[in-house]
Image: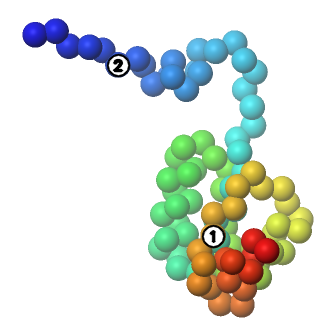
Amino acid sequence: METSKMPQTDTLLGATSDRPARPPRRILVVDDETMIRELVTDVLSRSGYEVDTAEDGAIAWDKLQHQHYDLLVTDNTMPKLSGIDLIK
């Protein structure tokens, strides 16, 4: 029986490419539940992203005024400012 070999992961991710390395993408994770916030942060950090966090929408809003983020990951139901109100 013949088996097929999968390409190496580093080749798929461009690790052997001649392209210049780009800086990691910045992501803001907003969730009032500490465990969820830490889990999402851990997964994204291990994937090479630079992650910042906020425990509610008001803190996230302040961070968004002073820092550029490539992506916002937010919970909907939070104290002070909901995720929906944050993205408006």
Which image quarter: residue 86? bottom right
Quadrant assignment for the N terminus: top left
Q: Which residue is found at the position 59% from the left and 21% from the top? A: 14
Which amino acid type corresponds to the residue marked 2 in the rendered image? Met
Label 2 Cα crowd, 10 Å radius (few <14 / some 14-19 / many 20+)? few
Residue at x-position 52% and y-position 46%: 46
Looking at marks 1 and 2 on the same chain, the residue that comes earlier in the sequence is marked by 2
Q: In this figure, which residue is indicated by the disc labeled 1?
A: 74
Q: Is residue 57 visible?
A: no
Q: Position of residue 25 (x, y in %)?
A: 71, 45
Q: Quadrant of the C terminus?
A: bottom right
The residue type indicated by label 1 comes to: Thr
For the point 64% across and 15% down, the residue is 17
Q: Which residue is mark 2?
A: 6
What residue is rendered at 67% in x and 77% in y? 83
The residue positioned farthest toward the bottom in the image shown: 80
